[in-house]
Amino acid sequence: MSEQHDAQMGGVSPGNAHAELATDASNVTTSTKYEERASKRLKVNDSIPFQSAPGEDLHDAPAPKENEQSTNGDKENEVPRPKPDPKTEYVDGRSKGVAPIKKEYLVDMSTQKDASNDAVNDDDAAEARGTAEGNAENGDRKPGKGKKEKKKKGQNTERDFGKFDDAFRLCNSRAFYPEFSPRECKFGDRCRLCHDIRKYLEEGRRGDVETFEGKCPVFEAHGHCPSGWKCRFVKSHMEEIEHEDGRKELVLISTSANSGENGEPKDEGSEEQRPAIFNVVSMDKKIDLNRKRTDFTRSDQYITWLNNEAKLSEEFMNRRKNQSTEGIEDLRARFVDPPFKPSEKRRLYFGQETPTLAPLTTQGNLPFRRLCVELGAQLTYSEMALSSVPIFDDYDHSKDIKFGAQISGNNHWVVTKAADVLNRYCPHLRLIDLNCGCPIDMVFKSGGGSALLENSGKLERMIRGMNAVSGEVPITAKIRTGIRNSRPTATQLIGKLAFGAREHRERLGAPGCAALTLHGRSREQRYTKKADWGYISECAALIKTYNKQKDTLTDTIAEPDASSLPNAKDGRMYFLGNGDCYSHTEYYEHIEKARVDTVMIGRGALIKPWLFEEIEKGQYLDKSSSERLRYIEKFVRYGLDAWGSDELGIGFTRRFLLEWLSFTHRYVPI
C-alpha cells in the first residue's frame, strides 16, 4: 500500500501495517512492485478516513490528522510531519525563487479572459503555430479561396508587435530642411508622401510629447535631432522666423557643427546619421550586399577549399579496411593546404575583473548595453544575428570598452562570408562570436544553433572559415552542455575546438577558437532548471589541461605559426561560464570553484543591471525605488537616442522597455 495509507492507519508503522494486512486479507500481497502499481491506480481522498476490511478492529477508528498527536502522549505513536525538501522549499514552507504576495494584491484569474484565446507571444509557440496551420498565413491556399494570399516577408512573420506610425508620412526631402528650402523631391509628382510641413505637423502625426518637460532628449544630448520634423518633441528645437517680405517660415534649430544655418544637414546623405555612431555602412554597400553584388573572391577561395576538404575527409574516414597502403597514401596526397593563412589575431583577455554581458536575444539591445556598460560591464555582445543579415549600423562601441558581434548560421560558407563582411565594414569589433547554443526551433531545425553540438565536423569548418577571413578580429563560440539532458557532449566538442579533429591537427593546426563560453544547460532544458556548474567545472579543468598540453600536441621541432593560434603567441583558449548568476557572491563563487576565467551574465543583469557594480565593489547594493526609476529613465533616453524620437523610435523604445520591465519587476529589495 502507499505511504499515504500507512500514515492514516492510526499511527501504526509502515512495516507493521503491511504485516497485518498480509495476515488478515488473503488477497493482498507483500510484493513491493505490486504495491507500487496499486498505489498508482488508487486515488485516495485525505478527507475520508481509511475503511479496513471487516473484522479488523485495529483500523475501525478514523485515522488522526497529520498535525494531531497521540492521546496517550507516546512519541512512538506520533504521526511524523513531512519534512520540507531543501531543494524545493524553505523551512517556513515557501518555495525557493518565489516571493510571496499579499492577498490584497492577488488577481482572481477565474474572472479573467481565457489566455488561450489571446495572441501567441512566445517565440517557439509562434513558430509552432505557423507550422501547425500549414503555413496558411504565409502564402498557402486556404480552403474555399481560389487565390493565394500575399506571403509575409521577413523573419518574424508569426509575431505581432503592434503597429505604430504617422497618419501620413513626411517625405525625406522635406523632413530635415526649412519650410522654404528649394530642395526638390527626386521622385517628383510620383511621390505619394507629404511635402507640406505645416499640414504634416497639424494632421499627419500625433501631438508633441510632454515627457521630459517637452524637451527632446536627443537634442539636449547632441545639439541636433536626426529625426527632424518627425520628432515628437519638435517644438523644443524649432522656431518660426519672419522674413523681410512678411513671410513666416518654420526652421529647425541646431547647435551641431555638422548642421547648416537653419538646422539642415551640411553633407548629402547624412540626414539620419546618429551622433557618435561607428561601424556605419553606406546605403550603396547595403544595396550591393542585398543584391549579391559584393565581391567575395577571398571568401569563395577558402569556401572552395573547405568543400573539397570535407569531401576528402569523408572519403578518408569511410575508406575500406582492406585498402592497400598505396591507395591510402594516394588519398592523403589529394589533401592540399589552404589557399591562404589567417591573419594574426588581436589578443583577448578574460579575467575575474571582466564580467561579461551575455548576447541576449531581444533584450540585448543598444540602450540596455549602454546602461550595463555604465554600471560596470566590461564586454557586451550584439543580439544574435542570422548570418544572411549581419548587423551594421550601431552605437560607438569603443565606449563599450569591448564589443563583439554574435552571428548564427547552419553552414560554413554562410558564416565565412558574414565574418568577411563584418571584418571589412565594422572595424571596431572586438570579436565575432558563433552561436552554437540557440535552442529556438526555427534555428535548430535549420541546422544552426544548438544543432551544431552534435555535428563537430561542420562546426570545425565554420570556425576555420571565419578565422581565415576575419582579419585581426578573434573568433569565439558559445555552446551548451548538449542537446539532451541525458547526453552532455561539450567535453567531446571542446577538444576539437581547441586543437581540431585528429586527422587535421598535424597538417592544419588548431581551428582558431580564441574563447569558448559554456551555458550550463542543455537544449532540452532551454532556460528552466538550474545550470550545471559541476559540468562547467569539468570542462574548465579540461581546457586548462589542453592549454598545458598544447605544446605536446603540436610540432615540437618548429615553433607553432602564430597565425594558427587563437590568441597570438601564447595560443591560450579562454573559458567562460554562463548560467544562474544573480549576485556578486555567486559570481566569485563560480570563478573560484568552477575555475572559469570569467562569468557571462544574462538574466541576472536583466533583473538588476547594477549587478556589475556589485561585482566591482564586492557587496550587495540595495537600490532605492528612485534610483531604479532613474535607470528606467536612462534606458528611455538611450532608446530615443538609438531609435529616434519620432513615432517609430518612441514605439520601439516603448516595446523594448516593456520587455525589460518583465524582468525588473522580479527584483526583491534586500
Image (cartoon, rainbow, N blue to C red):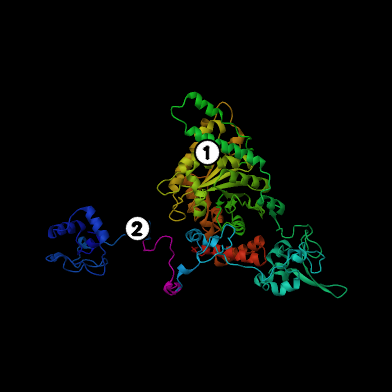
How far apart in space, not on screen, are marks 1 and 2 (Cα)?
41 Å
- Residues at circles 1 and 2 in contact by the CB criterion of under 8 Å: no
Residue 368 quadrant: bottom right
Q: Which mark is residue 85?
A: 2
Residue lying at the far left in this picture: please name it: 55
Task: Compare residues 514 and 318 and report the one nearer the observer.
Answer: 318
Whether residue 350 is visible here, answered yes or no, is: no
Q: Is residue 60 above or below residue 504?
A: below
Question: At which x and y percent is residue 258?
Answer: 77, 58
Query: Quadrant location of the N terminus?
Result: bottom left
Question: At which x and y percent is residue 652?
Answer: 61, 64
Q: Which mark is residue 525?
A: none
Q: Earlier in the sequence, mark 1 or mark 2?
A: 2
Q: Is residue 413 above or below residue 86?
A: above
Left or right for 475, reference 263: left
Q: Which mark is residue 498?
A: 1
Whether residue 113 is visible here, answered yes or no, is: yes
Q: Which region is colored magenta?
A: 91-111
Question: At which x and y percent is residue 244?
Answer: 88, 73
- Asked whether 107 falls inside the magenta stretch, the response is yes
Question: At which x and y percent is residue 579?
Answer: 48, 52
Q: Is residue 131 above or below residue 251?
A: above
